[in-house]
Amino acid sequence: MKLENHHQMLALAPDAPRAEAAVRRFFARTQLVRYDLVEVAEASVLPAADPAFWPAIDQAISRNRQVLQEIIEELKKAGIRSVDDLAVLPQGYQSKLAHTATHLLDGFFGIDSAFFSLVEDSHWISEALGQEIRRHPDEYYLLPVRGELQINRQQQLVSTFRRFES
């Protein structure tokens, strides 16, 4: 079986080929996610000057926020009402959800990342970076990436444990 994920990656580079090289370098070096295959849809790379750039960014960030909200709702169902409740959260499914939520909030890339900024190591775009992109749109690119991972039966069982990873 194979697991396939899609990400929108923001890169700072003088041109699209070097933006793609930055994305490939990231996937080659990150310890957080290891794909067997990483494909960049070259024909769909968007420079910041493209009118479709900001709507695509907004849509991908919205997906990150949606995943985060779904995790929060799951944690609420588990009885989490305040940060103090996390101290007594039993290890298991709910603690894995909390872990995934913190990764989204603190900028650790994961298979749940719909959008990721290589510029800020973040799932969002800061106001300052947004202004910088608008000032220098020829230096920023949004790259659609497909990651593929071949998984064996044991990995398949683990991946079905968390619905946010598929």
Image (tube, grey):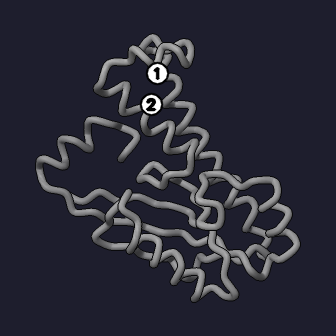
Q: Position of residue 99 (x, y in %)?
A: 42, 36
Circle 2 sits on which residue?
98
At horizontal 40% and vertical 71% (from top left) the residue drawn is: 29
Alpha carbon distance from label 1 to label 2: 7 Å
Left or right side of 81 for 161: left
**Earlier sequence position, callout 1 versus callout 2:** 1
Q: Does 26 appear above or below 107? A: below
Task: Tell me the quarter of the image containing the N terminus.
Answer: bottom left
Q: Position of residue 69 (x, y in %)?
A: 57, 31
> CB under 8 Å between callouts 1 and 2?
yes
At horizontal 58% and vertical 46% (from top left) the residue drawn is: 63
Q: What's the mark number on residue 146?
A: none
Which one is in front in this view, the residue at disc 1 or the one at disc 2? 2
Residue type at tag 1: Leu
Q: Does 134 appear above or below 64? A: below
Residue 133 occupies quadrant: bottom right
Q: What's the mark number on residue 75?
A: 1
How crowded pointer 1 is (Cα within 10 Å; few <14, some 14-19, many 20+) is rated as many
At horizontal 54% and vertical 12% (from top left) the residue drawn is: 81
Residue lying farthest to the left in this orientation: 153
Count of all numbered marks drawn on residues in the image:
2
Where disc 1 sits, the SS reads: helix
Residue type at tag 2: Ala
How crowded pointer 2 is (Cα within 10 Å; few <14, some 14-19, many 20+) is rated as some
Q: Position of residue 51 (x, y in %)?
A: 79, 70
Where disc 2 sits, the SS reads: helix
- 145 or 102, which is in the foreground? 102
At horizontal 41% and vertical 32% (from top left) the residue drawn is: 97
Left or right side of 136 for 5: left
Q: Position of residue 122 (x, y in %)?
A: 61, 54
Residue 10 occupies quadrant: bottom right
